[in-house]
Image (spheres, rainbow, N blue to C red):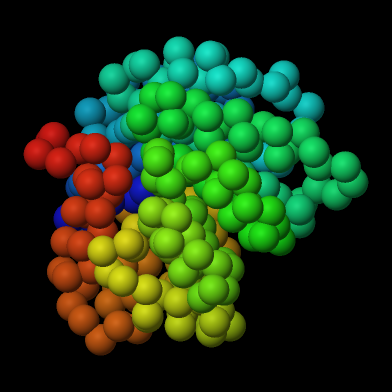
Amino acid sequence: MFIDSHCHIDFPELAERADELMSAMRDNQVSHALCVSVNLPHWPNVIAMAERYPHVYASVGVHPDYEDEIEPTVEQLVELAQHPKVIAIGETGLDYYRLQGDLEWQRERFRVHIRAARATGKPLIIHTRSASEDTLRIMAEEKASEASGVMHCFTESQAVADAAIAQNFYISFSGIVTFKKAEELKEVARTIPLERMLIETDSPYLAPVPFRGKQNHPALVRHVAEHIADLRGISVAEVAAATTANFARLFKLEGKLA
Ligand SMILES: [Zn+2]
Ligand SMILES: [Zn+2]
């Protein structure tokens, strides 16, 4: 069984075919998916997915690319995280690629999410792009290691992966790892400890090879696993077992994954 640790099936283009996506998951041995929140106005759609489908979990948080949102407070995130299907805080983090200028608000928002994660004991889903130094620094300053979490859709260097693992984090690979030119990333996927690895689609974006350029969805996560198995010279069953066990351990679902 495979688990898609990060998808956006609440987005309209996927939500409108949700039943079909669930049966595609079953057909491809994808047992669970984590539907990740990007802002609070649309959070009801995220939690609705988790309420409708037993094998879908949810997170709560505001993505760093959403500039014009009302800033969430620690209290607000803690309260929304009480829902039994909410297993993580995020996605949060820093993105200096999409947005430029004075991004102090992004760093402050990131700190709020880390504090909410520590207060709830729920792990963080961290998005970092062109901002790894500040991301790792703020994680350390705010003691994100106490909450743990995942560096999602990882595209950074081996050194950043090692530093995140040293802060008690997991590394999640998306379809990007299947792209021909992602040589440095393939090397990271080849060498990090298997017990620190997760897999994801980040759908509807970033469909893995051989579906590159098409609409992505959770069932395609098995292609990410197959590619990593090839890279490491191990069986896909081994990647599936390890990443599923890691997901359960990180999100405190051991013995509870129905
Ligand atoms: Zn992201
Ligand atoms: Zn995402």
Q: Eyeballing the image, is 119 above or below 55?
A: above
Q: Eyeballing the image, is 192 above or below 86?
A: below
Q: How many numbered markers are drawn?
A: 0
- Looking at the picture, how far across and down is residue 181, in whole percent? 58, 83
The answer to whether one can see residue 220 in this image is no
Instruction: Name the residue furthest left.
Output: 255
Name the image quarter holding residue 210. bottom left
Residue 213 placement, left or right of 255: right
Q: Eyeballing the image, is 189 above or below 208?
A: below
Q: Eyeballing the image, is 123 above or below 48?
A: below
Residue sitting nearer the eye, 106 or 115: 115
Q: At 77% across and 34% down in the image, what residue appears?
A: 105
Q: At 28% across and 69% down in the image, what residue appears?
A: 194
Residue sitting nearer the eye, 195 or 34: 195
- Looking at the picture, how far across and down is residue 241, in whole percent? 16, 61
- Looking at the picture, how far across and down is residue 251, in whole percent? 29, 40
- Looking at the picture, how far across and down is residue 190, in whole percent? 37, 80
Quarter holding the C terminus? top left
